[in-house]
Image (cartoon, rainbow, N blue to C red):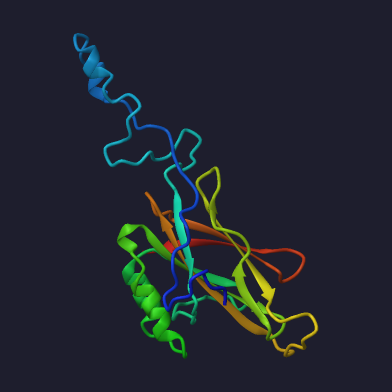
């Protein structure tokens, strides 16, 4: 499983990445009611809205989404969530403490305690979230890893690119068995936690698999 530069039991955050920004909030509507107070009517020009977020612009894109950090857990176990009919590639996007606890409290495996420590260190109240994705590898010597740094596109949609990657040297033989591989990633959002997350999983054939995950809160 992919690890960070500094391996700890719960993983660590990488350097701050990305930057965000958006249009200013609406003008103070009281400015249109008073013709003898021009200074007051322009006080809110260029300011953000009362809650400090810039919201959605005229195109419908959410410009308040800003990814500030991410971390990959050194350990991973499968959460106890309903994956539906998916047996190949599936994932879950956890955006609250209660949702994460429900997913991992009863998880089993040799690394379950380490994963629960990673979950407990996630500051959901400060905009941190968890992403779990599982895929199937063609042999036993593969892992599911980040293919690139997570980003937010111009429309304000978080994008996470993963790849099923061979971890053994080319000259080594691998076990001939379809093998589940998975990854657990912490994503930190600076202002607004998005409701959806786009995930692309490559390395499993000619076409990548795309997931659109809804936040569980």
Q: In this view, does 63 lie to the left or right of 99?
A: right
* Looking at the image, residue 60 lies above or below residue 40: below
Give the vertical position of 178 relative to 133 (above or below): below
Image-based side of 51 in relation to 202, left or right = left
Residue 159 image offset from top left, x and y in percent: 55, 56
8 w.r.t. 147: above or below: below
Residue 51: which quarter of the image? top left
Q: In which quarter of the image is the N terminus?
A: bottom right
Which residue is farthest right? 171
Horizontally, is 180 left or right of 55 in the view?
right
Residue 69 lies in quadrant = bottom left
Q: Where is residue 150 in the image (x, y as percent from the top left)?
A: 54, 57
x and y percentages locating residue 136 in the rendered image: 65, 78
Compare residues 8 and 54 and report the one nearer the observer.
8
**Residue at 31 percent of width and 25 percent of height:** 27
- The residue most toward the top is 36
- In the image shown, does 147 or 11 lie closer to the viewer? 11
Q: How many marks?
A: 0
Q: Nearer the viewer, residue 190 or 158?
A: 190
The residue under the point 44% across, 48% down is: 65
Residue drawn at point x = 50 percent, y = 49 percent: 18
The quarter of the picture where the C terminus appears is: bottom left
Q: Where is residue 209 in the image (x, y as percent from the top left)?
A: 66, 65
Residue 150 higher or lower than 61, as above or below: below
Q: Give the residue drawn at x 60%, y 79%.
A: 181
Residue farthest to the front, as pictured: 6
């Amino acid at each position: 499983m992919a690890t960070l530069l500094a391996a700890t039991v719960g993983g660590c955050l990488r350097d701050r990445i990305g930057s965000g920004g958006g249009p200013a909030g609406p003008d103070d509507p009281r400015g249109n009611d008073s013709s003898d107070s021009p200074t007051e009517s322009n006080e809110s020009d260029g300011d953000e809205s009362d809650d400090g977020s810039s919201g959605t612009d005229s195109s419908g894109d959410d410009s308040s989404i800003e990814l500030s950090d991410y971390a990959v857990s050194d350990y991973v176990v499968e959460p106890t969530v309903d994956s539906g009919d998916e047996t190949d590639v599936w994932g879950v996007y956890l955006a609250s403490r209660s949702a994460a606890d429900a997913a991992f409290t009863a998880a089993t495996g040799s690394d379950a305690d380490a994963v629960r420590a990673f979950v407990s260190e996630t500051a959901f109240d400060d905009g941190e979230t968890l992403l779990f994705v599982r895929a199937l590898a063609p042999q036993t010597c593969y892992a599911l890893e980040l293919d690139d740094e997570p980003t937010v596109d111009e429309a304000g949609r978080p994008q996470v690119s993963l790849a099923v990657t061979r971890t053994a040297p080319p000259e080594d033989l691998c076990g001939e068995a379809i093998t589940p591989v998975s990854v657990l990633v912490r994503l930190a959002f600076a202002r607004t936690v998005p409701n959806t997350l786009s995930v692309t999983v490559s390395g499993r054939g000619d076409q990548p698999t795309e997931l659109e995950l809804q936040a569980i809160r």
